[in-house]
DNA sequence: CTCGGTGGAGAGCGAACGTTCTCCGACACT
DNA sequence: AGTGTCGGAGAACGTTCGCTCTCCACCGAG
């Protein structure tokens, strides 16, 4: 096993465990056992648990956003692409191990004690917001719709997790659609 | 110091520390030191840390909702009372130690490992949802507006915490107002 | 075959955790 | 005054944590 594979296996294991149980509930030894990577190697690649946590968040950020944008950008530009974001959320919420937004969870757990992690969370949310802003702009929608749509998506994530009801995404979608038509009922 | 005061001081201290730093980051000894209540007394009142965590969530649930409803119910019934919820959120977000919804934070941190805590979180969110539902019903608004308004409030809480921007509550308020007028533009 | 370097397995380290126990001083009652 | 009960302070316990170290099997180069 070379460095690259060890790193991948560590991050795969860390992501699964951190997301499923929370960050502080998972010990380094558990990650080592589950991944099959030795402690020595682990600490070569990630000098501390905080480094591993940060790498987990960063990799999840890129992958999560790539998945979302890959899905939405395959739809026709305009309102439909905006609403596709909520369709993607609906699919995500339905996954059996869905447990809310990993970044919101991490922020609540370690945001106050780990400034680097908090910054990663802020960066992730800013990236999502920017993406939605781009969709709105290209759909000819006013900037004033960005916050509402973003807040609906955020609210859907936490609510779907706590109530374990994926269909919340569709309610958020309906609300977003209503806001879009209310803002410019006669738009093409 | 009698039992009742010890309990109050413990819960006050626990609430402050748990909310500020997260649950697992706060040790029982810190609560004992900060509260001035002896360990013996602490374990008489709360046989385990998990019991203290649960009591923290339950007391915060009642207080938080009482504060919100006390504020909103003082406004004229109808749409104004619904929108008052977001005004109250705006005030809360602006408090210097605001760090998001304690229940969302607790759910992300220990929801997967502490079923009682997870149930308390679900109960809290259900209570908030029910309260909003009552406001909508008494305002003559359709049930279909409940999810959108609730999701806007949820999204505002996490977003205000992560981006440290209280004014998000006012954006959510604007969006809720738009949804209300869009649903029944001609309502009184 | 010998060597030097690499990495895995896991023991070991000090600190911190949640929890319990020991000790002792402070009253309440006879 | 003597005795019993209570609670406070904090030592102590066993476990777990993040992290380091030891030991040895392996392997290519000479």
Image (cartoon, coloured by chain):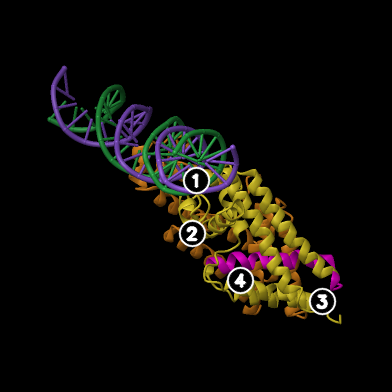
Chain colours: A yellow, B orange, C green, D purple
As helix, strand or loop, the secondary structure at mark 3 comes to: loop
State the image coordinates of residue D4 (x, y, percent, origin top left): 16, 33
Callout 4 crowding tier (Cα within 10 Å): few <14, some 14–19, many ≥20: some
Number of marks: 4
Q: Where is mark 2, residue-wise?
A: B111
Q: Earlier in the sequence, mark 4 or mark 3?
A: 3
Give me the C-alpha separation between circle 4 and circle 1.
Answer: 33 Å
Give me the C-alpha separation between circle 3 and circle 2.
Answer: 38 Å
Specify the subunit that label 1 lies on. A
Specify the subunit that label 4 lies on. A
Give me the C-alpha separation between circle 2 and circle 1.
Answer: 28 Å
Which callout, 4 or 3, points to the residue nearer the camera?
A: 4
Q: Tag on residue B146?
A: none
* Front in this rendered view, residue B15 or B133: B15
Give me the C-alpha separation between circle 1 and circle 3.
Answer: 50 Å
Quadrant location, the C terminus of chain B: bottom right
Residue located 52% across and 62% down the image? B124
Q: Tag on residue A78?
A: 3
Specify the subunit that label 3 lies on. A
Callout 1 crowding tier (Cα within 10 Å): few <14, some 14–19, many ≥20: some
State the image coordinates of residue A5 (x, y, percent, origin top left): 59, 56
Quadrant location, the N terminus of chain B: top left
Give me the C-alpha separation between circle 4 and circle 3.
Answer: 22 Å
Instruction: Evaluate whether residue A118 shows in this view.
Output: yes
Q: Where is mark 4, residue-wise?
A: A92
Span shown in magenta: A138-162
Q: Where is mark 1, residue-wise?
A: A39
Asked whether residue B141 is drawn in magenta, I would say: no
In this rendering, the answer to whether A38 lies above or below A91 is: above
Q: Are marks 1 and 3 in contact (CB under 8 Å)?
A: no
As helix, strand or loop, the secondary structure at mark 2 comes to: loop
Callout 2 crowding tier (Cα within 10 Å): few <14, some 14–19, many ≥20: many
């Amino acid at each position: 096993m070379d460095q690259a594979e060890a790193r991948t296996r560590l991050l795969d294991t860390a992501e699964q465990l951190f997301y499923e149980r929370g960050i502080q509930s998972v010990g380094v030894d558990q990650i080592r056992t589950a991944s099959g990577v030795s402690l020595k190697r682990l600490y070569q690649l990630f000098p501390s648990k905080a480094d591993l946590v940060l790498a987990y968040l960063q990799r999840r950020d890129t992958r999560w956003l790539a998945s979302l944008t890959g899905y939405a950008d395959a739809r026709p530009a305009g309102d439909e692409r905006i609403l596709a974001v909520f369709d993607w959320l609906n699919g995500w919420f339905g996954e059996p191990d869905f447990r809310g937004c990993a970044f919101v969870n991490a922020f609540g757990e370690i945001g106050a004690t780990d400034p680097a992690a908090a910054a990663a969370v802020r960066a992730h949310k800013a990236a999502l917001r920017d993406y939605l802003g781009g969709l709105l702009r290209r759909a000819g929608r006013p900037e004033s719709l960005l916050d509402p749509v973003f807040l609906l998506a955020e609210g859907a994530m936490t609510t779907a997790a706590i109530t374990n009801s994926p269909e919340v995404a569709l309610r958020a979608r309906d609300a977003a659609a209503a806001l879009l038509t209310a803002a410019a009922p006669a738009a093409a």
